[in-house]
Image: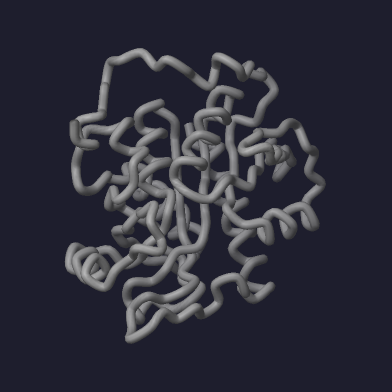
Amino acid sequence: MSIVDTFDCCGKEIIRASDFIEKTDSFPKSMIVVFSAKFCSLFLSKHNATEIGRLTAGGQKYPIYQFEYKGVQLGFYSSIIGGAGASGALEELIALGAEKFLYFGSCGALDKEIAEGNLLVPVAAYRDEGVSYHYAKPSDYLEIKSASRLAKIFDDLGVPYTTTKTWTTDAFYRETERNLALRKQEGCGVVEMECASIMSVGQFRQKEIYQFLYAADCLDGSSWDKRMLGNMPADLRERILVVAIETAYRLHNDK
């Protein structure tokens, strides 16, 4: 059986996150999720956050924080990198009681015209991973239904951004020149590791998932250009965190 035939829309799962995670009434309904220890450290240095729980994967514990912003309680979590791990953690956060999620993380530019640090709102994700085929009907691309709302908030905040398709792949050491060219032809401006996976989980579980990206390295050239990957300027990191928190606050207040 091909992977594109694995979506079972009505089948009951053998194991659910709710089988071993108990919902908490006081758990924050809106979560900010990052993929960076540096962003997590910055957040903790700027906000009076309380650790309210932990998720465990591979023997490692991943703290969940809660903090107040403009009178609203929001959650904060630094996720496992990669579609499979991030999606498993998302299922567990949903089981705990979260309903809205704003993800942000780095991506690789497939077009050298996308400058490092540019913010991008993905509108569709190429499904070059495994998770989404268990949560959505087979297709090359997964439409990101929440993109228009996120873009509207950025417009209201005066935050510069670009909309684009993204290439979600498990195999970051197999991003070949041929596949890069094909994705570019289809309109993908960037490549990352989680978007198609987490969006498919959110749509299947009927939860609100939003995501924006910031361009770090660049794959469009005669050789890979690391740019600011792993070495983001501190002032840019602070600005992006401010944007994320204000955006999460506005999403939380949506009716």
The residue lying toward the viewer, choosing from 249 and 99, is 99
Q: Residue 250: which quarter of the image?
A: top right
Q: Is residue 129 above or below residue 1?
A: below
Q: Is residue 149 above or below residue 226?
A: above
Residue name at image x 77 percent, y 52 percent: 44
Residue name at image x 18 percent, y 31 percent: 1
Q: By what rule are the colours in the image chosen?
A: one colour
Where's residue 149, x and y in %?
39, 47
Q: Residue 20: which quarter of the image?
A: top right
Q: Residue 249: which quarter of the image?
A: top right
Residue name at image x 24 percent, y 36 percent: 3
The residue lying toward the viewer, choosing from 31 and 171, is 171
Where's residue 46, x and y in %?
78, 56
The residue lying toward the viewer, choosing from 210 and 153, is 210
Q: Is residue 152 above or below residue 163?
A: above
Where's residue 225, x and y in %?
45, 81
Residue name at image x 71 percent, y 44 percent: 69
Q: Is residue 178 above or below residue 246?
A: below
Q: Is residue 147 left or right of residue 86?
A: left
